[in-house]
Amino acid sequence: MKIGCPTEIKPQEFRVGMTPDAAREAVNHGHDVVIQKGAGAGAGFTDEDYTSAGAVIIDTPEEIFATADMIVKVKEPQAGERKMLREGQLLFTYLHLAPDPEQTKDLLESGCTAIAYETVTDDRGGLPLLAPMSEVAGRLAPQVGAWTLQKANGGRGVLMGGVPGVAPAKVVVIGGGVVGTHAAKIAAGMGADVTVLDRSLPRLKYLDDVFGGTFKNQYSTAGATAELVREADMVIGAVLIPGAAAPKLISRAQLSEMKPGAALVDVAIDQGGCFETSRATTHADPIYEVDGVMHYCVANMPGAVARTSTQALGNATLPFMLNLADKGWRQACEDDPHLLNGLNVHAGRLTYYAVGKALGLDVLSPNLALKAA
Ligand SMILES: NC(=O)c1ccc[n+]([C@@H]2O[C@H](COP(=O)([O-])OP(=O)(O)OC[C@H]3O[C@@H](n4cnc5c(N)ncnc54)[C@H](O)[C@@H]3O)[C@@H](O)[C@H]2O)c1
């Protein structure tokens, strides 16, 4: 198969769909890999890294889209890229179609087959191609929160770990899933006094068994949240209710009860945010203040550490990408129902029920799509 990886063109996106290591693996499996000139630069990979892995560097995205059997990317294809997709071509990337009717229409019109990272599943009910970015955002949250807490940035001027004789920062993490657990681990590693709130008792049991000595946990009620937030130097929002907007767990009125200069890091901002006063920000201008409380609400946090994020995503996508290339999408999806769950579009038909429901469009069962022309 000829696998093509164009440069990401969405603003502020520095990741790349294939690492040189992934390119090498694909070449070792007998495939041709074409990478757009400079595609890896944002993540610290040079064209030479790719050519020494056996890939061929191509100047323009047009050449890649025109010749590749499979396009491997990070972000959903932008309008110009969608025009270049063609019938029978395989697209493997994040899509997030449900809130994006325009992209959906273009993908359907292109006739391509599109497998979305975010809906590929695993045996434990997880989303293995979404989890690495939650891990990154979670681990980044205390780091950016610690920076926000610095006096020059408007923060309270509190050091995460304190020093001998001075108490550490109090960090509250709301939501103990992938983001929350990684955030709590890093915050505790920085020496902070950390409490994780969650509504799932099995999750709290897991956190207690595995991290009982590292950070505390508590059942998430409005009362418990209010009490902990009043005392907190930093609150990290990491809740998720699948398929729904994030619940607002801290109201504007509560800000006046918080310590002046405390930091709110709302990782759940990509689902609308879990604090009433959250609004999405960018890496160029990440923080703002409301009622004396500092807010960090960057919607694409992993972009700040594009190299780590690219490597983490590449590790997760590699086995699926190799299967798609080795077997073709039909056989790969027939052999792996979790990969079939990633199928969102095939030959002008939607094949993912939740997207169809969100956009009011008919859906062809993915199993029937496997058999369709
Ligand atoms: N900003 C970014 O760059 C970025 C990057 C990655 C993920 N995210 C977002 O971070 C959020 C968390 O993702 P995740 O992968 O950790 O999800 P997850 O499903 O692994 O964890 C979410 C947790 O929230 C808990 N929860 C739900 N309602 C709660 C409540 N009222 N109080 C306390 N806990 C509650 C759930 O029980 C679950 O344990 C999502 O919105 C995700 O989209 C943002």
Image (tube, rainbow, N blue to C red):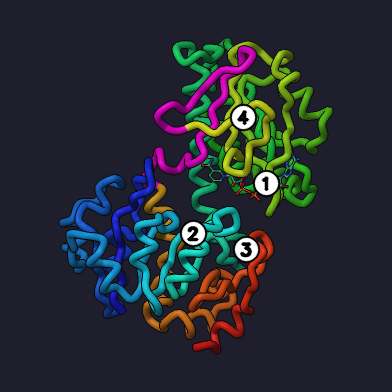
Query: Which image quarter has ligand 1?
Result: top right
Task: Tell me which residue sits at (53%, 36%) in the image.
Answer: 186
Sequence-wise first label, 3 or 4: 4
Q: CA distance from mark 3 to mark 4?
A: 26 Å
For marks 3 and 1, the one nearer the N-term is 1
Residue 188 x/y as whole percent? 58, 32
What residue is shown at x 50% (from left), y 31% (from top)?
281
Residue 222's place in the image compared with 5, above or below, is above
Disc 2/disc 1 C-alpha distance (Å):
25 Å
Q: Secondary structure at mark 4?
A: loop
Q: Amino acid at mark 2?
A: Gln
Amino acid found under the numbered disc labelled 3: Val
The image quarter in which residue 340 lies: bottom right
Question: Residue 278 bears which disc, if any?
Answer: 4
Magenta stretch holds residue 303? yes
Disc 1 residue lies near ligand 1 with CB under 8 A: yes
Tell me where residue 133 appears, x and y as whole percent. Answer: 50, 49
Type of amino acid under label 1: Leu
Q: Which of 356/196 is in front?
A: 356
Q: Position of residue 37 (x, y in %)?
A: 20, 56
- Residue at label 1? 240
| Relative height, residue 340 to residue 221 (above, below) | below
Residue to which mark 3 is pinned: 355
Frontmost of labels 2 and 4 is: 2
